[in-house]
Amino acid sequence: MAKIKIRQVKSKIGCPKKQKDTLAALGLKKINAVVEHEDTPTVRGMIEAVKHLVIVE
């Protein structure tokens, strides 16, 4: 499968706990952190939940 890179571009401060947990599940801890995941429907759903905090490269 294809790999996608996800970069956190905004802070999680002030976000609901569910969104903070989603960022943690993606492996994002700091602004400008980049992680690489397989392009699966599960990962796409997690990205959709926090799309205002991340960008897909």
Image: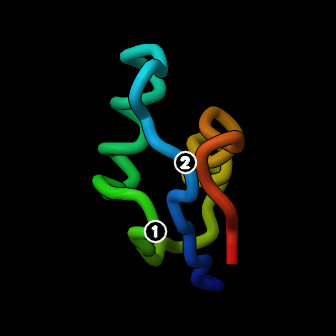
Which one is in front, 34 or 13? 13
Question: Does residue 27 appear to the left or right of 14 in the view shown?
Answer: left
Q: Are marks 2 and 1 in contact (CB under 8 Å)?
A: no
Question: For mark 2, does the 10 Å Cα neighbourhood hold few (<14), some (14 to 19), or many (20 or more) residues?
Answer: few
Q: Position of residue 30 (x, y in %)?
A: 33, 57
Assign a secondary structure to mark 2.
loop
What residue is at 57 percent from the left and 77 percent from the top?
5
Q: How is the image coloured?
A: rainbow
Assign a secondary structure to mark 1.
loop
Q: Choose top left, top right, bottom left or bottom right for residue 31.
A: bottom left
What residue is at 68 percent from the left and 62 percent from the top?
55
* Picture layout, residue 43 above or below residue 15: below
> Where does the N terminus fall, quadrant-wise?
bottom right
Question: Does residue 25 appear to the left or right of 38 in the view shown?
Answer: left
Give the mark, 2 or 1, whose residue is nearer the N terminus: 2
Q: Which mark is on residue 32?
A: 1
Q: Position of residue 22 (x, y in %)?
A: 42, 36
* Picture layout, residue 13 above or below residue 2: above
Q: Position of residue 35 (x, y in %)?
A: 42, 73
Whole-Å distance between the Cαs marked 2 and 1?
8 Å
